[in-house]
Image (cartoon, coloured by chain):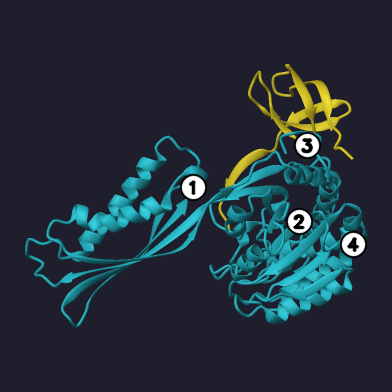
Amino acid sequence: MDRAAAVELIRGLVAIPSLSRQEAPASAWLVEQMRANGYDRAFVDGAGNAVGELGDPSAPRTIVLLGHIDTVPGNIPVRIEASAGGDLLYGRGSVDAKGPLASFVCGAARFGSAAARAAGLRVVVVGAVEEEAATSKGARFIAARFDGVTEPIPHACIIGEPSHWNRVTLGYKGRLLLDLTADQPMAHTAGPDASVASVVVDLWNWVTAQAAAHNRGKDKAFDQLSPSLRRFVTSTNTEMHDLVEAQFAWRLPVGFDAAALMAGLRAWPLAHLRDGHTRFEFHFRGEERAWRGDRNNPLVRSFLAGVRTEDPAASLGFVLKTGTSDMNVVAPGWKCPIVAYGPGDSALDHTPNEHLPLDEYWKAVNVIRHTLAAFGNQQESNRSDE
Amino acid sequence: MALPTATGAAQCPECFADVTLTKVMQNEITQCPGCGAELEIVSLEPLTLSLAPQEEEDWGE
């Protein structure tokens, strides 16, 4: 597969709309591309993911390249525009994350079936569905497939997310969402009782105080507990109750005890409200654990070799991200070497100006090829620490 | 086939001290015992160290 074919693949993939839960046409098209470009097996799996595999199905080692094929809404006309820095591909998903996914598909195709077999490696490329929907349906399906019973846990995993072609993402913060409702009987505003709004503000102040205590001495955002107030709506219902509907969200650091936080929130009304006439309903959802991979493992070494092979003068970097990705879904169960990688500037994610420099995309295609080659060479270690 | 490793000494590019290395692999990351700089093994023959890639924070996804 040459550069022109790789560019045509990403242009074609970006041109097919694939909002979350509407990925079927894009998945079917990508599977056809995989078949046409030498994949040994390519199919749409039970979740709707596009899956392509290279190498023997029973190879001693498996590496999963887990990108996502869905995008957020936004109609950006698909086009290639010339710029001083080279051609730019505009389109929804060009950065988040069809660029990374296409670089996986093309990089693995350039690595090839014969090289995979020679290295005793099975390369599984996945365009997962519903990453942007917070259900992560596609990634959960893949996590269940490679659960150590149905199929062996992978030896390594690369998540497809943009961080520029020369940077490797080592970790993502976790996440917790809370939808809460508080209500209490209406009372005169001149009376002695606190309004339900001020009660919920007190709860929010407790949340921020808890975070400040946890964050004391922690300078990096990745290590901090980061709460945000997403919604706060007051109303009065027909049963003469004042209501607050609010949403709190947290970005969680590695190792954070989310269960203790949830228990503390549930216990807060009893511990802090004397009169007991405010009723709370808490609905927690979207919990994902933070994950941070280490830097001394065969996958990271292979990436460093891959980037340096593509450009010996490249300035390499590691990244820790304060968002979440499918890494949070698969890493806690697999506990294998894992990174996220992909071309593009994540500051353009979800924006009307989303575009991908095609020179950078082609470099990423080749980094994936070189990285798979380096990983394939690391068949055995003569050290006892791995 | 075992992965190639190397044992020997190389100069820290930060403090210029000799760093003793035992059975290190290509692209492995280690730390200078003198100045604490994080270093990457960029060559096994000859053993060569460079500053390891920096760790940055970013939002996204």
Q: Is residue A221 left or right of residue A1?
A: left
Give the secondary structure at mark 4. helix
Residue corresponding to mark 4: A113
Instruction: Look at label 2 and name its amino acid.
Output: Ile
| Residue B59 % position (x, y) | 56, 53
Residue B9 to residue A379: above or below: above
Asked if residue A116 can be seen in this view, the reply is: yes
Contact? badges 1 and 4 (CB < 8 Å): no
The residue lying toward the viewer, choosing from A280 and B43, is: A280
Which of the chains bears the disc numbered 1?
A
On residue B5, which mark appears? none
Instruction: Look at label 1 and name its amino acid.
Output: Pro
Characterize the local packing of mark 4: few (<14), some (14-19) or many (20 or more) Cα atoms within 10 angstroms.
Answer: many
Hue used for the chain lettered B: yellow
Give the secondary structure at mark 3. loop
Instruction: Look at label 3 and name its amino acid.
Output: Asn
